[in-house]
Amino acid sequence: MDRAGIEKLLSAPLEELIIEASRVRREKAGSGIELCGIVAAKSGACPEDCKFCAQSARHCTHIPEYPLKSAEEIALAAREAKGNGASRFGIVTSGNKLTRPELDVICGAIRKINNDAGITVCASLGALDETDFHALKDSGLTRYHHNIETSRRFYPEIVSTHEYAERINTIKAAKGAGLQVCSGGIIGLGETWLDRIAMAFLLKELDVDAVPLNVLIPVRGTPMEGTGMMAPFDVIRTIALFRIVMEGKDVKVAAGREIVLKDFGALMYMAGANGMMVGGYLTVAGRTIAEDLALAEEVRRLWKNG
């Protein structure tokens, strides 16, 4: 469906939109649900000024700050993620770029995870170049995560310390090195519906493999702490629109879903999502592992019998 068609869907009844998104998911993406776990391998003290982020050194959020964990600690977290039912494990570091010694530690951790943990490894390490990406791929990395966060138009409203083009170039460099790419963003930042649609179509143009959608959690101490939470059905509508635009790509729901969707959590799968993050996020806790696994199993059963 082209952009004009998607914009028309903004006024469609939510029930009809969910039915269409569910059809696209079933026909294009199948009936699997992918669960992802992450580790905050390096936390806080980031020099960037992203208004939504608790890890920026420019905000007073009192989150834990620590340097890069060892390869052994990262591998241990990967084994825990696998034990929690995750099939993918993401290594995430704060800051816009890693030093070469830090990248070497990450490469060692990836090799160790592949040898010992038996879980597919992803990473989110900032704005690296193609040489760095080749080193990561040679170590066994399969997918790189780098969010574009929002539309090109709205991005300057939330970040001023680097350009939107840097995010696009990083994605292209990762793909140029032969890595899959996971890229999405945050909704509820104050962007318009047209910004969300523009973001979805840019991700489609970039041909990313997976799209994680986060819902803003207004963290105390950030410039966005007073931002109101999204309405749950607006989140569901957004998920459905992204599924219809992205067709067969993975659409995963991450931070904020527990707080905003609450009793409507299962509806995100009816609206086209086919994955979620389990075991908590970078600076906030999620639902219990048992609750998320039970939800995923119920949806799998429904899709199988439906």
Image: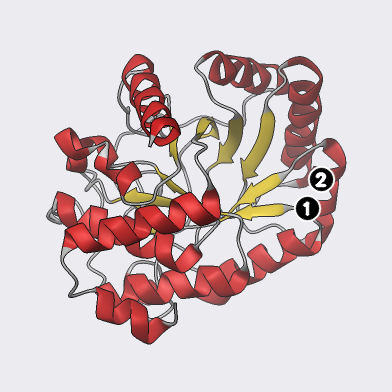
Q: Nearer the viewer, residue 203 or 159?
A: 203
**On screen, 152 above or below 30?**
below
Q: Nearer the viewer, residue 189 or 183?
A: 183
- How far is mark 1 from mark 2, CA to CA? 6 Å
Q: Nearer the viewer, residue 35 or 164?
A: 35
Quadrant containing the N terminus in the rendered view: bottom left
**On screen, 116 above or below 278?**
above
Report the residue at 30% width, 24% height from top: 287
Quadrant containing the C terminus in the rendered view: top left
* Label 2: which secondary element: helix
**On screen, 270 above or below 192?**
above
Q: Quadrant of residue 62?
A: top left
Report the residue at 17% width, 35% height from top: 262
Q: In screen coordinates, is 162 left or right of 113?
A: left
- Label 1 close to label 2 by CB (< 8 Å): yes
Q: In screen coordinates, is 160 left or right of 103?
A: left
Q: Nearer the viewer, residue 152 or 11?
A: 11
Asked if residue 187 shows in the view, the reply is: no
* Label 1: which secondary element: helix
Name the amino acid type tagged 1. Answer: Phe
Name the amino acid type tagged 2. Answer: Lys
Report the residue at 44% width, 82% height from top: 2
Q: Position of residue 49 (x, y in %)?
A: 40, 60
Q: Residues within 10 Å of mark 2 (few under 14, many from 20)?
A: some
Q: Position of residue 31 (x, y in %)?
A: 49, 40
Residue ID for mark 1: 133
Report the residue at 18% width, 61% height from top: 14
Residue ID for mark 2: 137
Q: Quadrant of residue 93?
A: top right
Q: Which mark is residue 267?
A: none
Q: Position of residue 199 (x, y in %)?
A: 43, 71
